[in-house]
Image (cartoon, rainbow, N blue to C red):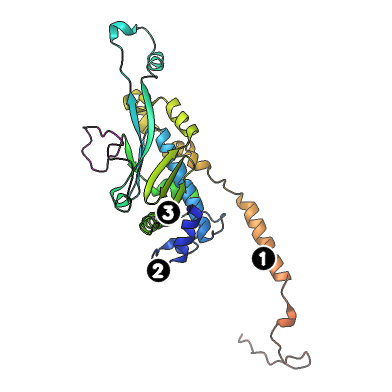
Amino acid sequence: MNLDDIYNWILSHPQNYPGKQQESQPRTVQSYKPLEPKAQFHIIIKATAEYIKEKMLNGNGVNMKELGAFTMEVISDYVKPLQHSGFNMTQDLAIQRADRKHVHQIRPCFVPDNAFKYFLARYPGKEEITKPLSQHSIYQKGFGMNFCNAGPIAASSYLGKDVVQSVHTSLIKAIHDLTRLGHDLHIDFGFIKISVQNRDLKYKYDQSFIQRLNQTDYELKMRKSDLGTSQHWTTTYQEKWSKSTLNNLLTRPNPNQVQENYEKSMALKIMSLDLNTAEQTNYSKKQKVQLPTLNK
């Protein structure tokens, strides 16, 4: 079963997966028309995949509750001693990082949640990633972990935040139920493909995504102090959102064109009225009608 089959399973069992995802919900922008329930699943999951992909390219992991963590493992080779490496203090910092870029290799991975592991017979071991000793939280599955925020996903799909949360909850619950029932699942998020066959979990990241991940300056993203504090506090949320890929996921239609099309459709509805099916009355032009008098 792929994602489309899972959507059909959720919509065909409303008693097991109640919520707003079962009905068509209004959009946050009036220029967009309401979507069918299945189309809402497609657009929200697509936006969720873009959200996770963008976070990982920025050096952060994303933890989806009761599903798993999309994170990465930093593999570091042995560094040559300073006296044998030809280290030059006069070089620029960017040049020094480029020389050491071969030292750090990033391997993306997926760590299933404990609630998901309960329904699996086999999955990647608990030592899939090495947890830093400085992170004492049980929710930390890697470096720079973030919970999946429904706000940006709702803003990019022009749907309510509660609708996005309802879709995520029903999808994860359906994955648990179908795994427990022994169904084979093929979940394709674009940059990663997760498969469950005979309750055996396997995943594979896209090769182009791995190349982009290793091309990014991960050392620079880990050093937050390289960016000025004044720049951090003066950058507005609109500027950050304009640079996000989620902002360009859907193109906003022209409101004037939408209003013009709406008026044309209403005019066609009025012109297509069938007067033969109107209610028959006994009104006659020769009949006098007694109108009420006006009090002056």
| Res. 181 image quadrant | bottom left
Front residue of this view, candidates 167 and 78: 78
Q: Nearer the viewer, mark 2 or mark 3?
A: 2
Residue at 47 percent across and 65 percent down: it is 12
Q: Is residue 158 visible?
A: no
Front residue of this view, candidates 19 and 10: 10
User: Where residue 216 sits in the image (x, y, percent)?
Assistant: 43, 26
Q: In 3D space, how far apart are the residues under numbered discs 1 and 3 (Cα atoms)? A: 32 Å
Q: Earlier in the sequence, mark 2 or mark 1?
A: 2
Q: Which residues are magenta?
A: 127-141
The magenta stretch spans residue 140 = yes
The residue beneath circle 3 is 164
Q: Is residue 71 above or below residue 74?
A: below
Three-letter residue code for mark 3:
Val
Q: Nearer the viewer, mark 1 or mark 3?
A: 3
The answer to whether marks 2 and 3 mark residues whose Cβ atoms lie closer than 8 Å is no
Residue at 47 percent across and 39 percent down: it is 191
Q: In 3D space, how far apart are the residues under numbered discs 2 and 3 (Cα atoms)? A: 19 Å
The residue beneath circle 1 is 266
